[in-house]
Structures are given as C-alpha cells and as structure tokens.
Amino acid sequence: MGRLERYRGHFYNWYDTQSLEPLPPRYVSTVDSGNLAGMLLTLRPGLQGLRDSPPSPVQIANGLLDCLDVLQDALTAAGQDTAAVLRWRLETRAVHEHLSLHAGVSAEGLLGLLQRIGESAADSHGEASDDSAFWHQALTAQCRDLHDELLWRTPPPMADGRRFGLLSWRQLAELDTDYWLPRHHGRIAALRELALERCTAVNQLLEQVTGMAQMDFGFLYDTRRHLLVIGYNADEHRLDAGYYDLLASEVRLTHFVAIAQGQLPQESWFALGRLLTSSAGTPVLLSWTGSMFEYLMPMLVMPSYQGTLLDQTCHAAVALQIEHGQQLGLPWGVSESGYNTLDSQFNYQYRAFGVPGLGLKRGLGAERVVAPYASVLALMVAPQAACQNLQRLAQLGLQGRFGLYEAVDYTESRLPRGQNHAVVQSFMAHHQGMSLLSLAWLLLDQPMQRRFESDPQFQAIALLLQERVPKTAAQYLHAAGAPAADEAARAHENKLRVFADPDRKRPAVQLLSNGHYHVMLSSAGGGYSRCNELAVTRWHEDPTRDHWGQFCYLRDVASGTFWSAAYQPTRGRPSSFEAIFTDARAEFRVREQDFDSHTEIVVSPKTPSSCAVCTSATAPGYAAASSSPATPKWCWPRLQAMPPTRPSATCSSRPSCCPIGRPSSAAAGHVPRSSRCPGCATCWRPTAWTSTRFPTKPTARALSAVAATWPRPRPWTRRPNGSRAAPGRCSTRSWRSAAGSPSTPARAPPSTW
C-alpha cells in the first residue's frame, strides 16, 4: 500500500495488480476512503496489543479444537478413519480444561501436545482425500507455527527456580540476564534480540497505519449542505454532483471518522437524513437500497448501544429481511453482490440489491438475489436465525472450497432453462473479509469494537452513536409491496445528469425534440436549432470551440459587467455552475458575483417551437441585473447545403415587431429570409417576448419565445436617476405560456428599454 499512488491521502479505487499503477479513471470514492480509514484506525490498537499482550493459551487450545473438528468432518465425509482425530481431540480437550482451570500456568503441556499432533498429522495426511489432506496440512502447519511461537515466548527458569508463563514481546525485550544462570544467558539474549526486532516492526507498522489513515476529507465536504459528495474524478478534476445524505448507510462510518479527526464539524452528522418507516410499529431508518451492507457494515468496527436509534434500526432491518425471504419462500439475506450475468471477459456483474420497504430506490422487488455474506453479517444481530439460514444455503450447493459462494440468483430472466436458481460461483475478497469480522464479533466477544472504542479520538464523540429513538416523528410512507413498473415505463424514466464543470474535455450534450423541431445543447450552453431538415441557427462541429447557438446575456446595471446565462459564449468562470439535463428539458444554474441565474430550455410538444426561461435573483443590497436576449446567426438552408465557410447561408437579423395584447405589455416579431432560388418559398421565424412587473416586489421579466430566441431589446433600468434598486429577480418566459396563464396578467414594462 505504501507504493500505491494517492491523491491528498486517498487511495484510488482501482489499481493494476501487476504494475500498481492507478487505472483510469483515477477516482476517489468517499465511502471507500472512509471505510479504509476506519479500519486502519481500528488496526492500531490491535498492533499495540500484538506488541504489549502475551498470547492466550486458552485461545490457542480453542483454535486447535476448531481445526480438529473441521478435519474430523472432512474425514467423515470421505468415509475415512477418524480414530486419530478423536484421540487428538481428547488430548486437546484435557489440556484446554487444565489451562482454563489454572490460569497463568506455563504452556509446557500445550507445547508437548502441539508437537505430538503436528508429527502425527504430517505422517497421516498423505493417504487422505483432497479435502481432508488440505486440513491435515493446515493442522500440521498450525501446530508447527504455534509450537515455535510459544518456544520464543517462554523464557527458561530463573536462577531462583521461578518460571514465567507466556510473555509479550515488550516484556521479552526488557529481560535482564542478571536473573538467570550463566548457561541461559545466550538464550535470554536471543529472546531479547528477537523481541526488539518484533517491537521495531510493530512500531513501524503503527507509523504507516497512522499515516495512511490521514486522508483529506475537507475537499469532499460541501459546507453549505454539510454533506459529503459521492467522490472525486482526479482525471477531470471534478467532484461528483451527488451527495451521501442518509444516516442508514455506510457513510456514517466516514462521517464519524472525519469528525473524530477534526476534519468535519459535528453538524455534518446531524445533517444526514433520518427518514423513518415503520416495522411492527417501531420506527426504522430508511436506506437507499435496503441492503444488509448499508445497515450492518459499520457495525463491523463501530460499537452498537442497546436501545438507540441505530441499534433498533439494525435489528428491524434484519427482521424485515427475514420476513421478505419468508414471503417469497426463499433463503433471506439481500445485499450488493454479483449476479448471474457475465461480461465479455466472463466476469460476473455486480450491483446493489435490497428489500422493498427498507430502501427508497424503486423496483427493489423486481430482482431476487440472495448473498450468503449478508446472512453472515446478520450474525451480529440475529445469530440463531442467521446460522439456520446459512445451513440452508449450504444445502442448496453454495458451499465451495473457500467458503460459501458469492450469491444465488432467483431472477427468472437470468435463469437457465429448466432451473429455478443459479449459483454465482465466485468469491469476493471484501465479502469474505467482512464475514470474518462478523464471525469475530460473535465468537470473540466483539474485539474490533473494543479496539475502536479504545481510541481516544473516537471516545470523544461516542455520544453521536447513542442517539435515542424519537418518540414522535414523521414517517415516510411508501408502498413496499407495490408492483414494479413495467420495462417500457422504466425505459422512459427520466435520467438526471448534472455537470459542474462547463469546460469538460468530453462535452456532454442534450437532445430535445418533438419529432419536427430539434434543439441540441452542450453542457457549456452552445448548440443549434433545427426544424425538420432546415437549420434554424448556424452550427459547426468544432472540437475546439462551442460558441454557436442562441444565448441570453445578463448585465449588472451598477457596474456594467455582463455575462451569459450559461458558460458560452462569454466563457467567464462563474462562482458556481451546474448544467442539468433530463429527458424533458435542459437547465443551467449560474452564480456570478452576487447574482444567481436559472435558465430552462424546453421544446413544445405540439408546435415546432422552443421556449427559454431565464430567471435571475440578486442578493439584498445590490442593484438588479437586466437580461437581454442575443441575436444569433440565423440560418435557413437545408443541412446538406450548409458549408461551414459559406457566408451567404447566414441571414442578417432584420426583425420586425408588432404589439400583441395590451400596448407595451408584449411584442411579437419575425425574422425573414428571402428565397435563394426562383420559386422557393420564403422562410419566416416568428419571435415573441414579454415583460412583467409585480407590484409586491420589483421584478422584471424579459420574456422570449419560441422558436428559440429574441431580437435584442435595449436593457432597461428600474430607476433612471441611478439610485439603487431593491433586490428582485428578472426572468424570461415564453409569450405563449405567459399569455395563457390567467394568474399572471401581463403588465406594462418600465418606461426605459
């Protein structure tokens, strides 16, 4: 890990396992970094215990008994003789009972037992089957390693006859030869030298772990929302537009670690969403996908306090997972995992699955994938039910050489013909690691939680984990069992795309159309309009420039500074920028100095026209901005007849205007282009705009319509005497929508344009 490239302390998400170079795109995941930092900080007390605490003979005997039990099961399954294993188990059990009754005695009996079992196992595993041979070898290696370790941990008797039990490396490093007979001085010196080497290695590891856990979360934190972004793309120098905003997710470990390190304020913890649903009348926090991973992964290291909101939520989440499996007649345990779909490299695909009723995401009930590691995580909450479910999964054929397989897929669309399930025969290292931590939680009395709590910086904010269940709280009601939308409806579901960098290396585009009228917009604000085969505005496919299209300018009447409602064409770097694309519209949100502007562009579903609405808001105490639509280069030829360097294809802007409705309340105009050949029809481009002031707050609306843009009116000033105008907003809206709304009557514009 020390050789891997990092960004501000963060490890990238993907590295080449051969060259150790980061794989493109170089991406920093917020939660993955937070999880890693939490695990590294939990590792520190473990390393300190490795240096300062002696091994426990009772735990060594327990581990030996477990290995013997597994070996006996393997021999029984192969139909082989288990007499030797039974004899070893009896001897180990006797030593274990002796050590349990006489704590602190020397480990000489255990040393002799390890030597006898190791020699016998090494002689007998050659005739065993593959599985039993593996466990014979494992038993032999375990006995040999433990025997050597205990020899180095046990010094010889002192000069006065006293004996030590097992000592820690720190204690061995402090031994003094003056207390031993001369014939033992050589061994004491060797023990002390080895102990010093081990202590030095542990200290170096502690320094490395502490350094790797120092990751900069400040640049991933939004101070306005008090939330962490999803991640950062280092290749594009771009933060993701989305945020983690739910307490019932793995991000709570990231927030907790960053708060403990002083990088985030405690307000960020309380900014996490606490949407509640009800399970058997008990409030339960909602997650995004309702997966076991979101609820239980932080429990692998973080302590859980009985009666708190998080503790109750985790128990209710497991109960709902069990109920969901019973309703479907399937094993339970749903989480993010692989599923029965392969790519071109024959790798199983991977994504998050969850339980309806626990997750906010739609369509969770459409797929049925059960992950065994989810049941292993549930051992921390419901051990008996989880054990029974794991046994059921093993009976279905999910047990492999390295444990239970990744998942079993019951989704009908992905099943082979004639089968009711498909086993995802893969092993994922991080799922196996989480399973080991969950087993340690159950079998070793929560060792990781004790280490986590021993860190002083975590102790200082432990109260954050003890949040009580609210007595009264608004609950999020949603149809957990509602049928998922059909495939056609999901195919037409709006997909939101948000771009915060206007000057992207790979420009994003949005296409809006009603079948006859077409608008293309880039994430920088450029684009074109087209009506059937007629090019309404000029457009060049230029990879270096994107300044074509129709634009709206904003001007600060106090300073005279002007800018565009999007990045193009002025190319000024705004304080904040967002291009938001959905299937129905395109939006641009720009903050320039003390002015916010919001531009929306849509295409009419019925007529060959488009509508642009530009709304600007000023901060209190500043003069209002005026908006002015710019005149683009009109272009009426057919697409195939429009060479990029032909000036005759551009018509000059000669708009003619006429009032509509009440005088001065609105206006309409047209932009003609004379025919280019005898007998060809003249093209007309109708245009309309309107302006509205509201009596309650000084407001101006310079409205533009329609096929896409306006003639340029003179910018108007609220107060001809130059005095400061009250805070207000200026918007442009289509004449068609404004005139058709009885709730917003058109009013006369200011006297000065």
Image (cartoon, rainbow, N blue to C red):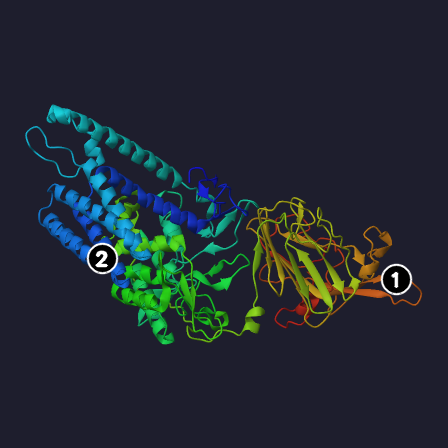
Q: CA distance from mark 1 to mark 2?
A: 94 Å
| Quadrant of the frame with the N terminus | top left
**Would you place residue 539 above or below residue 323 in this image?**
above
Tag nearer the camera, 1 or 2:
2
**Would you place residue 720 above or below residue 694 in this image?**
above
Question: Would residue 307 be seen by someone viewing this image from the given angle?
Answer: no
Could you say which quadrant of the image residue 103 lies in? top left
Image label count: 2
Q: Secondary structure at mark 1?
A: loop
Q: Residue drawn at (70%, 50%), measured in percent from left and top?
A: 546
Residue found at the far left of this picture: 160
Q: Residue 215 at x, y = what percent? A: 42, 42
Q: Residue 286 at x, y = what percent? A: 39, 64
**What amino acid is labelled 1 in the image?**
Ser
**Left or right relative to 610: residue 290:** left
| Quadrant of the frame with the C terminus | bottom right
Q: Residue 540 at x, y = what percent? A: 76, 52
List the residue tagged with mark 1.
674
**What amino acid is labelled 2 in the image?**
Asp
Tag of residue 69: 2
Q: Closer to the camera, 52 or 153?
A: 153
Question: Would residue 419 be seen by someone viewing this image from the given angle?
Answer: yes
Label pair 1/2, CB-CB below 8 angstroms? no
CA neighbours of label 2 inside 10 A, class few (<14), some (14 to 19), many (20+): some
